[in-house]
Image: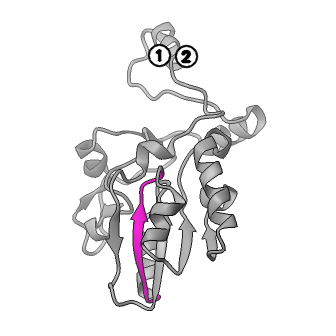
Amino acid sequence: YGVKAEEVESENIKIAGLVCKNFSFNYSRPGADGSLLDYFKDQGKLLICDVDTRGLVRHIRDKGAMNAIISTETEDIDALRKRLSEVPSMEGLELSSKVATKEAYFVGEENAEHRIAVLDLGIKKNILRNFAQRNCYMKVFPMDSNLEEMKAWEPHGIFIANGPGDPSAMKDTIAEVKKIVDSGYPVFGICLGHQL
């Protein structure tokens, strides 16, 4: 599980922690800059292994999405339950604003054949790299941007990006996406962007 800086999909780890069945503390990936464990430690993220993830998935399937807590402390279960009860429910949780860019930025060659306005809801860098490889120049807009701001850049099309969270909690973004769809621009989306 070696980590290569050039392949990182975001500026930092967005998940609160990682739960896995098996974890290799040694890495042998060619060209790796460091281990996955060090990557998590550097960003203050938790990782737990040797968990029956199949059983966990069956439990979630049967009971529905739920919050969880990862802790090395097992003495005071009531304190952990209290902390867990303070975590907002996943249902109706809007997370994109926590991970999307706050400032517009550009990706690709300015003289590329296609100009794509990207509404960032938490996009992965590899999506942008793939567009750039397909002769696209992109301006990535913060999620609170409006159609007029995107139109001012004169794009050939508008891409509604992926991201985390419950789309039903994104009322303002839904309203803006309706304007974008009705604008006459070619519009496409992936994951959360497609749902919206």
Q: Which stretch appears magenta?
A: 134-143
Image coords of residue 191 (percent x, y): 62, 60
Q: Quadrant of residue 165?
A: top right
Residue wearing tag 1: 83
For residue 9, side relative to residue 148 (left or right): left
Mark drawn on residue 85: 2
For residue 32, side relative to residue 187 (left or right): left
Verify whether residue 71 appears in magenta: no
Residue 70 vertical placement versus 82 (above, below): below
Report crowding for label 2: few under 14, some 14 to 19, many 20 or more residues within 10 A (C-alpha): few
Residue nearest the observer in this picture, 79 or 178: 178
Q: Quadrant of residue 93?
A: top right
Q: Quadrant of the C terminus?
A: bottom right
Residue 19 visible from this viewpoint: no
Residue 128 vertical placement versus 54 (above, below): below
Q: Amino acid at mark 2?
A: Ser
Residue 154 visible from this viewpoint: yes
